[in-house]
Image (tube, coloured by chain):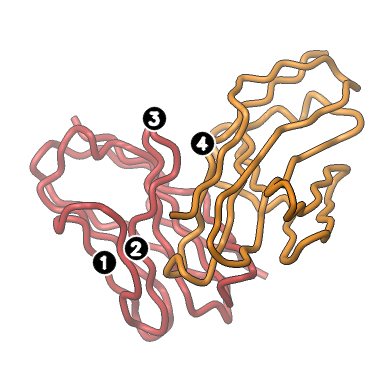
Chain colours: A orange, B red
Amino acid sequence: GDSVTQMEGPVTLSEEAFLTINCTYTATGYPSLFWYVQYPGEGLQLLLKATKADDKGSNKGFEATYRKETTSFHLEKGSVQVSDSAVYFCALSDYNQGGKLIFGQGTELSVKP
Amino acid sequence: EAGVTQSPTHLIKTRGQQVTLRCSPISGHTSVYWYQQALGLGLQFLLWYDEGEERNRGNFPPRFSGRQFPNYSSELNVNALELEDSALYLCASSFGQGDGYTFGSGTRLTVV
């Protein structure tokens, strides 16, 4: 069945460092792909999305490109801030999944000043 | 525009009791989804409601149930609470499947 695999955390970076969080997926159809962020004590917020191959989603300095050939949707940011400390979830939506989003296990990011 | 609202934000229940959690979707969204986020277990899909009907259900026992009202708000009911039901319960809404969800802030349930 469909699945999402993320790199394990926690990831610890210094402020202004470059961030990559790897995400790969397995899907039988043509899924839409998403990144969500969860700040401590809060629900999930949609960070960015891409609905077809080669689409690039971007928001708040974060970017991810839908790569069908490598079944990947890696999250990147050129210069992280302390306020980016959160848990990041990669997810997919596929027509054959009965409406549900399939989430990766989440990657905790900690940015130190 | 108001986001997805959930109530209550926190509650503590005793094992064996019953609990009802509530969710109001974004105006215009007809689909409501419920997820459980237990410590160390990630996000587990519970239920999907659309247009008042249950469309899909995750791998949870029947004591987890819910419904969606004509105004598209939703309730999640959990009967015979067990300690492992302690979790953050997240509600989300969407207009269409490919749009992604908008999540509420969740209800933190503690079973003692």
Q: Gap between marks 3 and 2, in whole Å?
A: 19 Å
Q: Earlier in the sequence, mark 3 or mark 2?
A: 3
Secondary structure of the residue carrying tag 2 is strand
- Do tag 1 and tag 3 residues touch (Cβ < 8 Å)? no
Are callouts 3 and 2 both on one chain?
yes
Q: Which residue is mark 4?
A: A105
Residue at x 15% of width, y 58% of height = B62
Q: Earlier in the sequence, mark 2 or mark 1?
A: 2
The amino acid at mark 2 is Leu
Question: Between tags 1 and 4, which lies in front?
Answer: 4
Q: Which residue is mark 2?
A: B47
Residue at x 62% of width, y 70% of height = B98
Q: Which residue is mark 1?
A: B66
Question: Which percent across, then down, holds residue B75?
Answer: 31, 66
With A36 as the anchor, is A104 left or right in this view?
A: left
Secondary structure of the residue carrying tag 3 is loop
With B53 as the anchor, is A107 left or right in this view?
A: right
Are callouts 4 and 2 both on one chain?
no
Question: Between tags 2 and 1, which lies in front?
Answer: 2
Question: Which percent across, then down, holds residue B74?
Answer: 36, 70
Q: Gap between marks 4 and 2, in whole Å?
A: 19 Å
Question: Which percent across, then down, holds residue A65?
Answer: 81, 51
- Do tag 3 and tag 4 residues touch (Cβ < 8 Å)? no
